[in-house]
Amino acid sequence: MLEHLQPKAVFSYFEEICNIPHGSYNTSKISDYLVDFAKQRNLWYTQDEVGNVIIVKEATAGFEDKEPVIIQGHMDMVAVKEDDCTKDMLTEGLDLVVDGDFISAKGTSLGGDDGIAVAYALAILDSDEIAHPRLEVVITIDEEVGMDGAMAIDLSCLKGHTLLNIDSEKETELTVACAGGVNVAGQWQVNHVETEGAKYKVMLTGLSGGHSGVEIHKGRANANKLMIELLYLLEREVDISLCSLHGGTADNVIPFHAEAEFLCKKDFAQVEGVLRAMEEVLRSEWEKTDPGLQISVTELEKSAKEKTMETTDFFRLLSFFLEAPNGVQEMSKELEGVVETSLNFGTISYEQEGCVKAGFLIRSSVDNAKHALASKIRKMIKESQGSCTKSGEYPGWSYRVDSPLREKMVRIYKEHFDREPAIISIHAGLECGILAEKIPNLDAVSMGPDMYDIHTTEERLSISSTQRVWEYLLKILAQ
């Protein structure tokens, strides 16, 4: 599919990666693929017990005295698919599509974040013609779900103190700092009662979704929050009893889909009428950010008798989720237009006769603000008679005033592109802060080719930008 694209080696490896299922928590095959790659080329490697892989290639002739360079990315992707896509992303590879300058995947996310970093690294490691110092390639697992791989990895085998993180999505930018984050998971035990009525299924679809760090400031609708509003309205207007509720795909993805099943004694026309009125209101409210918003309702059974959530518990949870914070909480006072603190209500699930579970991701460039917001949401969970756990906490990556790597990359960028790069701090999380705690005096910069709508089924990677960034990367290694 990609054999005609340039750089040929990069896209060849990218296609191989796309043929291997590698969503978060499903990285064993891609990890073993990297090990096999190293073995076949007699390169030194290590694979730890969680699946992180490090591959080392010694310097080419004339570069033996140069400072080693660490090339770093992650092997997992956010694996999401469209509602009607039948692909099993746990076992099947992606169906790639080339359309003009862009590569995407049919019906699913692409995983350019961060498959392109792995493809760049393998293309360099496989070449006998590219000039470079000692290369230390670090590929981590499960970055997208809490940076678990970076947290666990042992980097004592590395000699380098200069790191190129290839996990950014805009060619015109070099990232030099980022926010820290923490996941909070809530769980609520609920009682159940036997209920009779017609059984309905309501689906909220067509939202834009997106990366909860990169696009949180765009004010896009959160499907989980909107579904809670729908359920509150349905309870008030037609008296429903909840059977199940599901929304979101991961804590770091702005939810673009949610669905619920419920029993109700009202007929289909009354239920549909309430939802049509709500759809009109929501489509007007979110027309600029989520023009594809749709609400659909289906009558599953005309007469059902099932266990549903007890009414008092239903109201208790509706109250919590309606009041829980979501989205941007604070903008930076120092950097105009930059988000300081945010919370993404990423996932919710409830099955018949089960408990309710929800996941939240908090990000902030200010540690105290991150901890304060985490404490606030945990307190709210406990006050609503739930329990909670905190996990996946990672530090922010602080701006380094004296950075020889940044200065070199800016100089080469201007020579290569004939323009200045933007030097930025981002609200999304990068592994650089964690790795900086493991490598004393680490000098790091993040870069990457143009990608759009990452973490969604609209994700696409620019072919021409991949070529330009490849050439830029090689120039960095050669100096």
Image (spheres, rainbow, N blue to C red):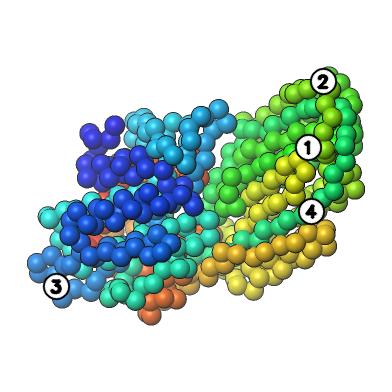
The three-letter amino acid code for the residue at tag 4 is Gln
Query: What numbered label is drawn on residue 314?
Result: none
Q: Residue furthest left?
A: 61
User: Residue 307, position in %: x, y?
Assistant: 82, 38
| Vertical side of 96 occupied by 362: above or below | below
Tell me the SS state at disc 4.
loop
The residue tagged 1 is 243
The residue tagged 2 is 302
Evaluate whether residue 227 shows in this view: no
User: Residue 266, position in %: x, y?
Assistant: 89, 24
Decide which of tag 3 and tag 1 comes sooner along the chain.
Answer: 3
The residue tagged 3 is 64
- Choose top left, top right, bottom left or bottom right for residue 296: top right
Label 4, residues with CA under 10 Å away: few <14, some 14-19, many ≥20: few
Evaluate whether residue 132 shows in this view: yes
The residue tagged 4 is 189
